[in-house]
Amino acid sequence: MKIIILLFSLINFTQVSLASAKTFYFVVHPKNTEPAIELERAKNIILKKIKRWDSGNKIQVFLPDGSSFPHILKGVFNMDTFRWEEYWGEETLRTGMKPPLRLKSELSIIRNISKNKKAFGILSDTKFNIENNKKLKVVLKIEI
Amino acid sequence: MKAFLFSTLFLISVNLHATSVEDRLLVLEEEISILKGQVNESKKIGILNSKRLNLGGYFIFQAESINSNQSANSFRKIETELIISGELIDRWTYFNEVEIEHESGLDKATKHTADRFYTKHQDIIKLERAWINYEKSDLVNIKAGLMFSPIGYMNRTHYKPVILGTDRALFLRNNMISRTFSGTSIWGRSKRLLYEVYGGSNPTVDETPFVGGARLEYEFAYKKHIAFSNHNTRRADKKYTTVNAIDIHSEWKNFNLTIEYLKDNLEGEGYYIEPSYRQGSWQFFYRYDFADIDVDVDQDDDYHRQILGVNHLISGNKRLKLDYQLYDYKIKKDSNNKNKDFSKITFELAFTF
């Protein structure tokens, strides 16, 4: 009986570990005048329903690839990769609009955003000390 | 003492050197990962991921088995939709879609029951859409050219790699609406409200009669919306019509529901209800489809269709489909006193490239 309880708790522990919350930072160029962004607005920017900043500049979105990506899809959009591809398949065939660029390296996202005043991106990696990084401006922080 | 100082200085210098090497290695690793990232990002070229010019489209292959007065099997359709699109300059985009299609005809024995749905063997190359768009803001866009009429849901989004069925709704197979028009459209969104107002001419009818209307959509979330459309045109039988439509799309967990209803001022009517359920890479659906187009070749005939189907998703826009369709006519016999009802099984492979 004890073994069963132990196994059950191990399974539960594994599930909790797998589903553990992760912090994500929504970032822009430090000179971007956009104040803090609400999650709804961030979602619409990523899905390209909002395509321009208030200044009129076209927003360029960079997303992390790899294991962070399904986590973001589930936590932010309640989508899996099938739904994401279906959404962009429909948008691309209907309007010619393309999905946001996904970059394998988070440093690459930082470099792109620090060089581009129109850029918007999501980062998860804390080794770059994102909140105090002068090359970026955090407009939204969420735990999912 | 000297030996101690010397050895300490030596250890410090080794440590400093080691730290410096570690830092350099870290920077190098990150640079390599960026380069790897860039290589991975640029190696795929297709409609969904090319950078400046979109050159891609989708491909479908369809095989069909009809069970009528006499059965018929055919590799019915091979179709490539080639899309060329991109950004000209900031705010100006263009979009072209060329359809290249081979469609098999049916033998004479089967044609008498199902002939309203099948033309003769044909090979088609035609320009399906060609437009240019100016994006003033998210609220105001102006589009000009040849485009789909923004009425209802399925007429705007019937791209085979992303829809469930192998066939469109019955009311789209007939001439209840002008599926496309050439003209101008003003469209945009304000938060959850989307609108489109359009006007032009019907490219499939001679004498270029007017086509025009509007669509208003409220979007609760992705794939959750309600929309109203108005569409004015002249049909192939030269009758002027005003069509009003409502379409609703909703989802809850893995369940989806799409409902669309159209009615015109000449007593034409069409609707379908399509619930579906997705489990992993498998998607199951049912569609009840009805049309009373009131321009029937025999007489004022209603008919409905039930479809039971399954999709296997290779990805969100690459799928294998199998469905069973059952056609049921109000008037059962045609002019040759043959039964008009029939059923068919269709297999389709549809993917973007």
Image: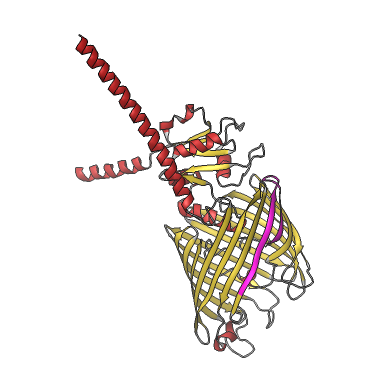
Residue B213, position in %: x, y?
A: 74, 59
Q: Quadrant of residue B173?
A: bottom right
Residue B127 on the magenta segment: yes
The answer to whether residue B158 is seen in the rendering is no
Q: Is residue B261 left or right of residue B3?
A: right
Residue at (44% x, 43% y) in the render? B35
View extreme (bottom): residue:
B336
Above or below — where is B249 with respect to B73? above
- Give the percent coordinates (x, y) of residue B117: 60, 78
Which residue corresponds to the image point at 32% horizontal and 22% vertical from the top-left?
B16
Magenta residue check for B101: no
In the image, the segment drawn in magenta is B124-147
- Residue A1 spot, x, y in % from top left: 20, 45
Q: Nearer the viewer, residue A95 or B212?
A: A95
Q: Is residue B319 left or right of residue B262?
A: left
Looking at the image, which is closer to me, B98 or B67?
B98
Q: Residue A47: percent from the left, percent from the top?
A: 56, 47
B242 left or right of B8?
right
* Marker count (numbered): 0
The answer to whether residue A115 is above or below residue B106 is above
Instruction: Let me know if residue A133 appears in the view.
Output: yes
Q: Main secondary structure of the magenta part?
A: strand
Of the pair B63 and B334, the residue shown nearer to us = B63
Quarter of the image for residue B183 reads bottom right
